[in-house]
């Protein structure tokens, strides 16, 4: 496995070169410089995302995110699909992720993801979602609230905190347990948060209706 990760950059380079030489006329295919420019342009407008929040999304989406090359993460591939509105499939998706991973660190990719991911109620990114669900900035959320936001990308409609309360809590608790297993939080922190009720503001406010 270590040999695979060592050879991965070369493998991805070959894949990217092969894809670029093909017919990409109908694909929005970015090169690394374009990916970097797009990130820098967007990141200049983003408030800081707390470390615990970043870790919660890693626990929910890709627990090995920090242990593997950023190019192979599903998180990176999702960014490529959203940001570049690509209809790419197969090797094209890998090539786009490679372009992003060539110029961005794990933290930068994760920052991009948490600021762009759809979290229900018209909310894209954790900052607007924190206000929509809890009426507070993301930096002031409790652990159990942060874990709930990280639980949403899989299926925001399925984990509605009011209509599907039990499912929402179950998914939140899964994220908390994964955070504990990954070493992001202690066993006591996880148990306390799991035993805490999920309380959101009512009625929930659509992000596109916020001032």
Image (cartoon, grey):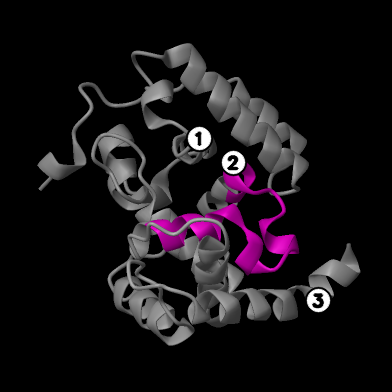
Q: Secondary structure at mark 1?
A: helix
Query: Residue at image x 73%, y 33%?
Result: 188
Query: Residue at image x 35%, y 72%?
Result: 43
Image location (x, y in percent) of residue 44:
31, 76
Distance of label 3 from label 2 (alpha carbons): 28 Å
Range of the magenta residues? 58-81
Image location (x, y in percent) of residue 93:
52, 61
Quarter assignment of residue 39: bottom left
Residue hosting label 3 = 7
Q: Which mark is residue 151?
A: 1
Residue hosting label 2 = 60
Q: Evaluate if marks 3 and 2 touch, with contact meaning CB atoms under 8 Å apart.
A: no
Of the residues tagged 3 and 2, which is closer to the observer? 3
- Image: 14 above or below 68: below
Give the crowd class for mark 2: few <14, some 14-19, many >=20 residues within 10 Å.
many
The residue closer to the viewer here, 206 or 8, is 8
Q: Is residue 37 left or right of residue 14?
A: left
Query: Residue at image x 36%, y 40%?
Result: 119
- Image: 138 above or below 149: below
């Amino acid at each position: 496995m270590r040999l695979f990760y060592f050879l991965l950059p070369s493998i991805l380079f070959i894949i990217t070169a092969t894809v670029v030489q093909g017919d990409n006329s109908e694909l929005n295919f970015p090169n690394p410089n374009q990916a970097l420019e797009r990130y820098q342009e967007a990141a200049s407008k983003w408030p800081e995302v707390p470390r615990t929040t970043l870790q919660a999304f890693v626990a929910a989406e890709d627990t090995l995110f920090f242990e593997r090359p950023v190019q192979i993460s599903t998180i990176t591939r999702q960014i490529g699909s959203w940001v570049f509105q690509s209809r790419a499939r197969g090797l094209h998706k890998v090539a786009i992720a490679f372009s992003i991973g060539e110029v961005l660190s794990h933290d930068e990719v994760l920052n991009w993801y948490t600021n762009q991911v759809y979290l229900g109620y018209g909310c894209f990114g954790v900052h607007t979602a924190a206000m929509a669900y809890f009426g507070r900035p993301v930096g002031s959320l409790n652990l159990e609230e942060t874990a709930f936001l990280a639980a949403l990308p899989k299926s925001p409609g399925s984990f509605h905190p009011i209509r599907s309360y039990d499912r929402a809590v179950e998914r939140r608790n899964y994220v908390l347990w994964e955070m504990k297993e990954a070493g992001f939080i202690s066993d006591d922190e996880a148990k306390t948060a799991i035993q805490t009720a999920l309380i959101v503001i009512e009625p929930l406010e659509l992000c596109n209706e916020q001032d």
